[in-house]
């Protein structure tokens, strides 16, 4: 099984923390949408497996008209092999949608919506330069919960000026709409963003790391109480509602990324990414070719990725798999490096699987990097 990702690189305005590829100039939107179809056709032989997830991300794909979304989905189904059941997700910004728009998406074939709420506090939304306000957040989540059985809500923690109480309020407000899936991200400072500039100029202070950890731990507690499974560090799903799109990434399945800046993986060791520039993308597609870069992952890269994913997900790291795929040199190394974390109760063996304990989850990336094999 495989996944298909469509990147729509336009946003109304730039959020202060965001370093995804997008343009705030709406010029060329139609050309990009046309080129996405051309690229889909150009690359149709790259995916040999059936597609079980189609994901419209960005950018802000909720700027695409439902009729156009429908055309793209139809185009995909006439050029690619689809699985019997396909999760078809579109990322939605609260300020882009009306009830009619969401109904249109449903008619177009979208069966899952991922809603970028981020916060239910106007002060926090303003600070991040989100284009929506509290009322739009509440209205959009209400409509979506009425229209879609499957939807996800994005929230951000670690926001400057936030507290444990304001974060708890965000969690409880989201929970009051009973979303089947919640994704949460710690606000991080990415280079060349307004946020990075503010931190550099000392006009804004980041939240204390201990408070960020407390916010994450509170999230774990609150969502666990409500029956969500924390199947990946940032992702929580009710039983049967793990994101197929996200799970495919973490399970190393092949995916094809279409559109400017979209990434692809062949399920083996080849990764590629399209040029992050709308004009250059359009030019190359017009010439009937791709403007992308490719890298071949080494055994060490693949082992390190497996370790990182294993510690971040409920699936853990299988020692047997490490031995079979990478050899005893890697599994012996894994065991040796893991020992000190077994003593501190941060890692544990669940049969053949090395997993992270709840108390150490917040530190999983740091612990994973200590289990990495250094490149020669
Ligand atoms: S809407 Fe999404 S993609 Fe666009 S700037 Fe904000 S976070 Fe980035």
Image (cartoon, grey):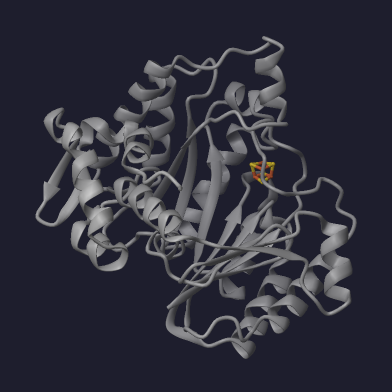
Residue 163 at what x, y percent from top left?
Answer: 43, 16
Q: Is residue 176 visible?
A: no
Task: Decide which of 192, 222 is in the foreground and name it.
Answer: 192
Outermost residue on the top side: it is: 202
Residue 231 position within the rendered picture, expressed as x and y whole percent measured from the top left? 30, 51
| Quadrant of the image containing the N terminus | bottom left
Q: Who's the residue at 52% across and 72% down the image?
A: 266
Q: Which residue does the image show at 61% across and 86% down from the upper left?
A: 45
Q: Ligand 1 is located in which of the four quadrants?
A: top right
Q: Quadrant of residue 339?
A: top left
Q: Is residue 368 left or right of residue 30?
A: left
Q: Is residue 344 above or below residue 237?
A: above
Res 182 seen here: yes
Is 65 positioned to the left or the right of 355 in the image?
Answer: right
Q: Looking at the picture, does residue 101 appear above or below residue 116?
A: below
Dividing the picture into quarters, in which one does residue 90 lie? bottom right
Residue 172 at x, y percent in the picture: 37, 33
Q: In the figure, residue 78 lies in which quadrant? A: bottom right
Q: Is residue 13 above or below residue 97?
A: above
Q: Residue 369: x and y, percent?
A: 38, 38
Outermost residue, front side: 376
The number of callouts visible is 0
Tell which of 360 and 4 is nearer to you: 360
**Residue displayed at 75% across by 49% down:** 22
């Amino acid at each position: 099984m495989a996944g298909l990702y469509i990147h729509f690189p336009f946003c109304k305005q730039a959020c202060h923390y965001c370093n995804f590829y997008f343009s705030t100039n709406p010029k060329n939107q139609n050309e990009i949408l046309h080129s996405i179809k051309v690229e889909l056709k150009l690359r149709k032989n790259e995916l040999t497996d059936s597609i079980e997830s189609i994901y419209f991300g960005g950018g802000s794909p909720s700027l695409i008209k439902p009729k156009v979304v429908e055309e793209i989905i139809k185009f995909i189904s006439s050029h690619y092999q689809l699985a019997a059941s396909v999760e078809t997700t579109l990322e939605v910004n609260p300020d882009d949608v009306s009830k009619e728009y969401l109904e249109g998406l449903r008619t177009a074939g979208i069966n899952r919506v991922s809603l970028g709420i981020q916060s239910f506090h106007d002060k926090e939304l303003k600070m991040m330069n989100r284009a929506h306000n509290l009322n739009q957040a509440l209205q959009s989540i209400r409509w979506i919960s009425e229209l879609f059985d499957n939807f996800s809500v994005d929230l951000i923690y670690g926001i400057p000026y936030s507290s444990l109480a304001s974060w708890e309020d965000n969690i409880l407000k989201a929970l009051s709409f009973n979303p089947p899936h919640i994704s949460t991200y710690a606000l991080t400072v990415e280079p060349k963003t307004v946020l990075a500039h503010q931190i550099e100029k000392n006009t804004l202070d980041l939240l204390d790391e201990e408070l960020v950890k407390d916010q994450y731990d509170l999230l774990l507690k609150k969502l666990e109480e409500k029956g969500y499974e924390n199947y990946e560090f940032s992702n929580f799903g009710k039983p049967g509602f793990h994101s197929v799109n996200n799970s495919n990434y973490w399970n190393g399945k092949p995916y094809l990324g279409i559109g400017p800046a979209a990434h692809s993986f062949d399920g083996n060791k080849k990764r590629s990414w399209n040029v992050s520039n709308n004009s250059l993308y359009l030019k190359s597609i017009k010439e009937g070719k791709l403007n992308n870069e490719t890298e071949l992952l080494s055994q060490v890269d693949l082992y390190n990725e497996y370790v990182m994913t294993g510690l971040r997900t409920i699936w853990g790291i299988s020692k047997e798999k490490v031995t079979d795929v990478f050899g005893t040199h890697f599994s012996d190394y894994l065991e040796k490096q893991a020992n000190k974390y077994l003593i501190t109760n941060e890692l544990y063996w669940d049969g053949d699987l090395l997993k992270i304990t709840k108390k150490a989850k917040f530190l999983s990336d740091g612990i994973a990097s200590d289990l990495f094999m250094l490149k020669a």
